[in-house]
Image: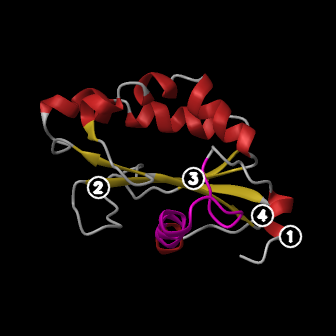
Amino acid sequence: MHLAQLNIAKAKYSLEDPEIKEFVDNLEPVNNLAELSDGFVWRLKDESGDATNIKAFSDPNVIVNMSVWASIDALKNFIFRTHHRDFLRRKKEWFHNIPEDSYVLWWIPIGHIPTIEEAVIKLEFLRDNGDTPNAFTFKSNFSASEFLASDT
């Protein structure tokens, strides 16, 4: 099994505004870093090379990021042990706080590429049910075997 993840953020500014320029200017280098990271499998992107123009929610200021990883540890290593963490620490400069869960993790069969619709369903499931083997956060870290053994 592979691990899929969706995270969303609500931008404080239009992506063309100077207040968010540093974030936008670093999308490509950080995305490249992800793709070169151990355990990276796939990421959502459009013809421009990122997912900022892909709209999954009615609010046009909500941007999405979705990727697939070989393991939870591979994703954690990228998020928390690379240059990515420097931008994660600064997210309050560019993005509003979202009071609900803003990311979700779930297990998928190897070779499956999740759709944005599937990811939104997983996020809504998490928000409605809390952490389960079907949709979870880093707080729970359900294993693939727990997912396979569950009825969710």
Quick one: label 2 or label 1, which is nearer the N terminus?
2
Quick one: label 1 or label 4, which is nearer the N terminus?
4
Regarding residue 91, the answer to whether it shows in the image is yes
Residue at left 39%, top 54%?
100
Image quadrant in which you'd find residue 15: top left
Residue 124 lies in the magenta stretch: yes
The local secondary structure at tag 2 comes to strand
Which residue bears the numbered disc 1? 149
Q: Estimate how packed mark 1 is, as few (under 14), some (14 to 19) or many (20 or more) residues with alpha carbons within 10 Å.
A: few
The mark lying in front, picked from 3 and 1, is: 1
Q: At label 1, which amino acid type do we have? A: Ala
40 horizontally vs 129: left or right: right
Which residue bears the numbered disc 4? 110
Which residue bears the numbered disc 3? 67
Which of the two residues, 111 or 104, is positioned nearer the viewer here? 104
The local secondary structure at tag 3 comes to strand
Which residue bears the numbered disc 2? 62
Residue 94 at x, y percent in the picture: 26, 34
Q: Estimate how packed mark 2 is, as few (under 14), some (14 to 19) or many (20 or more) residues with alpha carbons within 10 Å.
A: some
Q: At label 2, which amino acid type do we have? A: Val
Tell me the distance, in whole angstroms, between the alpha carbons under discs 2 and 4.
29 Å
Which of the two residues, 68 or 91, is positioned nearer the viewer here? 91
The mark lying in front, picked from 1 and 4, is: 1
Residue at left 49%, top 39%?
31
Magenta highlight range: 120-137
